[in-house]
Amino acid sequence: MVRSKGGAVSFRERLEQAIAQNHSLLCIGLDPDVERFPAGIPRDPEGIVVFNRAIVEATADLVCAYKPNLAFYFQYGAAGIAALAATRQLVPPHIPVILDAKLGDIASTSAAYARAVFETLGFDALTVHPYLGSEALEPFLSTPDRGVFVLVRTSNPGASEIQDLPVGESGEPLYLWLAERARVWNQRSGNVGLVVGATYPVELASVRRRCPDLPILAPGVGAQGGDLERAVRAGLTAATAPLLVTVARSILYADASATFAESARAAARRVRDAIEQVRQEVAGQAGHR
């Protein structure tokens, strides 16, 4: 395992420890929609913390990571950022927390973003976009104890407009070219992962074949319609690195009653167990080859 200067545990190692401890590849997206909060929880930033605390306490033994999306907090200004910082502190220290912010800018700006996300707010990992090239990603890539998930093939319906464009002499799709570049960037600190939507299992399988050694964050199962079994098979077959299956709304809002946290736990357990079943099948098939 890659270790940072001074012997600190790398992000990859902490992620794998959480996976092993909870027998889970489930990453819950902490994307609070106050309009969907149960009665009795304030529909404001303070209510976000109350809601997230209940979700984390109910599911912390069922996940390998949490992933709050910056936009759901940033929309409330300073109070929302305070709720994001408080949410980060709610998660037990052995479970990685990935900030989904999709950042990337010129190097000096990215350096400021890196300090804000990793030092000020204390997140374990971040999603970034690679459109400005490796120079813009350098500040994020320089610390192996923090993870960097590069957008490669996203889960939204319009992703193909740009991400499937043919590039280079081979004419391979851009998302595969980016995946290959991410493998090169990973050689520095060993902290790079990929974002590949679970809504596109064929593309996910292509990326996994190209990058068996990089963690993949796969959003899109649940409300976005991604097929869990197909996505897990695509992301695990031939893999030597983890797959993080991200689910948000179908767990967070499994029930709008006063027992919402218990319902969220039940939903999370169902997803975690379904993923584990497929993971065992994939491992068994690999062992018989």
Image: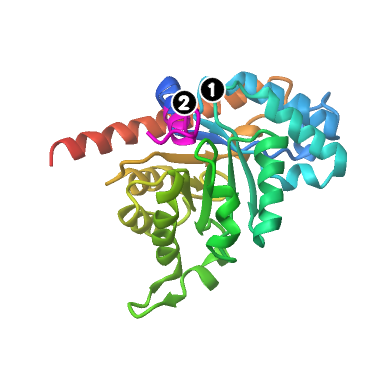
Residue farthest along the left direction in this orientation: 289
190 lies above or below 87: below
Please state the horizontal and vertical placement of residue 139, each as a whole percent of the image: 60, 51
Question: Which residue in the protein does label 1 denote?
Answer: 94
In terms of image quadrants, where is residue 276?
A: top left
Q: In the image, is 9 to the left or to the right of 81? A: left
Crowding at dot 2, Cα within 10 Å, few <14 / some 14-19 / many 20+, comes out as many
* Mark 1 touches mark 2? (CB < 8 Å): yes
The disc at residue 138 is none
Q: Is residue 161 above or below residue 80?
A: below
Q: Amino acid at mark 1?
A: His
Residue in the image at 59% along x and 66% along y: 132
* Magenta span: 1-16
Percent x, y for residue 223? 58, 46
Q: Residue at x 37, y 56 (%)?
A: 207
- Residue type at mark 2? Ala
Is residue 260 something that shows in the picture? no
Q: Which mark is residue 18?
A: 2
Give the residue drawn at x 66%, y 60%: 105
Mark 1, other Cα within 10 Å: few <14 / some 14–19 / many ≥20: some
Label 2 SS? helix
Q: Is residue 248 above or below residue 22?
A: below
